[in-house]
Amino acid sequence: MTALICRCYNQFVMDRLAEVNFYQDCRLVKDRPVLVGVSGGTDSLALLHLLVHNGYSVIAAHFNHHLRPDAGEDAKFVEASARQFGCQFVGGEDDIAALAAKEKLSLEAAARKARYQFLFAQAEKYATQAVAVGHNADDQIETLLMHMLRGSGLSGIAGMQSRTFLKQFSSRIPLVRPLLNFWRVELEIYCRNAGLSPRFDFTNEDVGYTRNRIRKELIPILAEYNPQIKERLHGLAAAARNSLEILAEAVDSKYQDAFRSSGKGFRGFDRQFMAGLNESMRIEIIRRAAMELLPQSEDIDQAALKRAAQLALQSNKTSRTDLADEVVGLIDGDRFYITLKSSTIIDSRYPQVQHNEPIVLNIPGKVMLDAAWQLTAECMDAFGVVESDTFNTDSWNVIIDADAVTSPLSVRKRRAGDRFQPLGMVQGTISIGDLFTNSKLPSTVRPNWPLVFSGDEIIWAAALQISDKVKITPNSRRYIHLRLEKLNYDE
């Protein structure tokens, strides 16, 4: 550590080392702006100064979390520092405590989510080449130890990368961490030498936060066993990243082979294919899907991933397991899902209606449902007396008695209390829920399954069963053809 500290006393050496990281590790260029997240603390202030000092075009961005009484002073300080360095300044804010309660996240996770949403929104607005943050080598060690304590796998031990894409915030603009090879003490010395006076965040001293306890309590204990423990752990993270690079291609290939669908808050995979993979590969696919959905989560440990990996092997038609932070593993029929509890899974193989209000279906007429499904009603000319079993042999096309319905028809998803008199049941009704169960309909598509109504009566549970009340009889003379079809749209 002493040798590392010494390099900070030479400002020229520090600048040159930083420039190598900017160009080589982070791939920054000087002819496009960089948006820098600046809290006002040592790390981010040093990063801002180093980028400016090395000739980069910089926009300083500060996000006020409103978690400390003096948080407003931090914002003023960063704005003044940006002016001093000749940088543009942008600011944002949110009530993180309220956000955490609303979205059932920890304060740390909610702060991270809101902060990155702000930073990447500004990066998009100003067309910057990257979002840069001041994570340093000590942060890397603390992150690694946090992941190890939670039972993380290889990706957790690998820690943070110098350049990465947080696809939930932007698929075009990378997040870069130019200071991962610098220790916190080096940055403190650099700030003193450069005449910088960073803001002090007293919450960094609060051992009620796990990261602070690791820094102030655990690392000093580990240093008693090995005074070079931080350097050793830093090397371990680098080795893990190298191993992950080798494995990434294999995981990418299997992920794509297993992948079947995605949407807001869910990823769907082929259950049989997943069951044919070894457990380690299933875990890596699940880990990647979970991180795509909730990358700010730090609570999904190896035990939870293993539980989810076991789902694909179960014989149940449906089953689920909670991972952490609202992430759920779910099997339903031939699909394996990683989803957020609050999300609705849309399986485009099946017709779905997400609208809360009924959709009017004129006769003749057609309506578009979700996932490129179309429902059509057509009038049919009278053509004499027919037997009822002549039609309705195809569940996607049904013929009903036009005189048994009132036009227009309507289409909606199920509601509590919906009941239905299926074909063949002369008296009485059954619940729509029982019909879905008897039809072995996948549970994930039941809430939004389309139901066709005449007035207040369900006349067709689409593609499943018509009502006995609208069946064709020897007395039927006018007919309506209802057709449900999947249009040839790309998913």
Image (cartoon, rainbow, N blue to C red):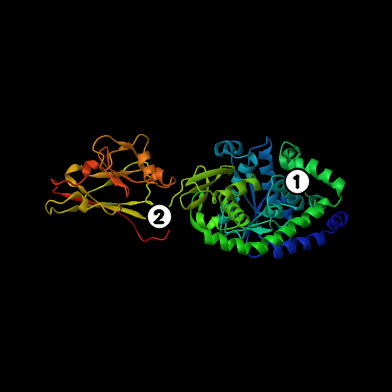
Please state if 71 lies on the left or on the right of 486 as rendered: right
Residue at the spot of label 1: 198
**Quadrant for the N terminus in the image:** bottom right
Q: Amino acid at mark 1?
A: Pro
Query: Could one spot residue 415 in this view of the protein?
Result: yes
Instruction: Name the one closer to the observer, 128 or 483.
Output: 483
User: Please, what secondary structure does the residue beneath circle 1 have?
Assistant: loop
Q: In the rendering, at what x and y percent does residue 404 appear?
A: 19, 42
Please state if 52 lies on the left or on the right of 130 as rendered: right
Q: Residue at x 12, y 54 (%)?
A: 383
Q: How many other residues sit within 10 Å of disc 2, few (<14), some (14-19) or many (≥20)?
A: few
Q: Residue at x 72, y 40 (%)?
A: 210
Residue at the spot of label 2: 349
User: Please, what secondary structure does the residue beneath circle 2 have?
Assistant: loop
Please state if 97 lies on the left or on the right of 194 as rendered: left
Quarter of the image where one finds residue 201: top right
Q: In the rendering, at what x and y percent does residue 301 appear?
A: 65, 46
| 93 lies above or below 270 | above
- C-alpha gap between disc 1 and disc 2: 56 Å
